[in-house]
Structure formats: structure tokens, C-alpha cells
């Protein structure tokens, strides 16, 4: 805990395939989430830093980010520097959050059904 932590909703991991994420796209999202410390402040790690963490080239990071954006999971927000120079993009993950919110009721229902099925005696018959 002293080195930090990142909260990841289990639904992201459970629904990776349903969302259409390949393992590297998921890894990129997890890295972005590690920089998302509050709802008001969007993450803005550089592609270079992400590439170092993931062990892939900055160009590959850029390609995966473009795929995530095309899928509507993230949105790149260009940040303009006050001086000459370039800032890293911000990343809005609200598309991912909305997609997970839509899946949540189904996952919750499945979890509740699993609890009912696995309890002693199994499912109870409902009376008409």
C-alpha cells in the first residue's frame, strides 16, 4: 500500500471479452486508470511513459489508444502548453465508465442468480 494502489472495477476484468478488449488494450486501460486519481482530473500520462510501463513502442501505444477511442471507450483531449512545447494528452474514460454501467445490471442479476442456485436447497419454486 505504501507504493500506491489503483481501484479497478471487477466488471472491467469480467467483461473484457464482451467489451471487445484484447489483452494489450486492457493493459493500456489499466495503465491509464493508474493515473486517474480523481473524477474531476482526467489522467494525462505521456505515450513514452506508457510505452516504458507496457514494454511496447510509443507508436504501438498510440495505435492502441486510437483503437480504444474508436471503440468509444476513451477520448483523447489535446492539451496546449502555455509556452512552446508539447504536453501529453488527457484521456477521458467516461465512455468506458458508461459501457460498464450498462453491463452492471446484467452482471448483478447473474451474481444474484448464482447465489440462489448455490445456496443449500438450490432455487425455490415461486408460487403462482
Image (spheres, rainbow, N blue to C red):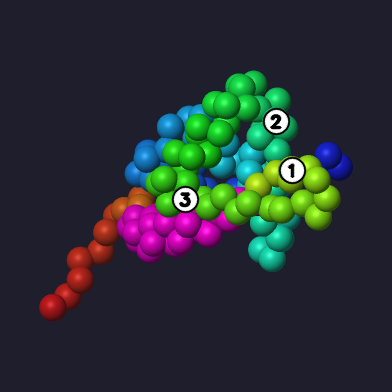
Residue at image x 56%, y 34%? 62
Dominant SS of magenta comes to helix
Residue at image x 48%, y 40%? 66
Residue at image x 74%, y 45%? 87
Residue at image x 13%, y 78%? 128
Considering only order in the chain, which callout, 2 or 1, is on the residue closer to the N terminus? 2
In the picture, residue 111 is in which quadrant?
Answer: bottom left
> Does the segment drawn in magenta span residue 63?
no
> Disc 3 vs disc 1: which is toward the camera?
1
User: Which mark, by number, is residue 86?
Assistant: 1
User: Which mark, by number, is residue 22?
Assistant: none
**Marks 1 and 2, how far apart in space?**
13 Å
| Image: magenta residue range | 90-113
Q: Quadrant of the N terminus?
A: top right
Which residue bears the numbered disc 2?
A: 48
> Disc 1 vs disc 2: which is toward the camera?
1
Which residue bears the numbered disc 3?
A: 73
Amino acid at each position: 500500500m505504501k507504493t500506491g494502489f489503483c481501484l479497478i472495477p471487477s466488471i472491467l476484468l469480467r467483461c473484457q471479452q464482451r467489451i471487445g478488449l484484447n489483452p494489450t488494450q486492457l493493459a493500456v486501460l489499466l495503465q491509464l486508470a493508474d493515473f486517474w486519481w480523481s473524477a474531476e482530473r482526467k489522467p494525462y500520462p505521456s505515450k513514452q511513459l506508457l510505452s516504458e510501463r507496457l514494454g511496447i513502442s510509443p507508436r504501438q501505444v498510440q495505435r492502441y489508444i486510437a483503437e480504444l477511442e474508436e471503440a468509444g471507450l476513451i477520448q483523447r483531449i489535446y492539451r496546449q502548453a502555455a509556452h512552446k512545447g508539447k504536453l501529453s494528452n488527457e484521456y477521458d474514460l467516461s465512455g468506458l465508465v458508461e459501457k460498464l454501467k450498462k453491463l452492471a445490471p446484467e452482471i448483478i442479476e447473474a451474481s444474484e442468480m448464482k447465489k440462489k442456485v448455490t445456496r443449500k436447497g438450490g432455487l425455490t419454486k415461486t408460487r403462482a
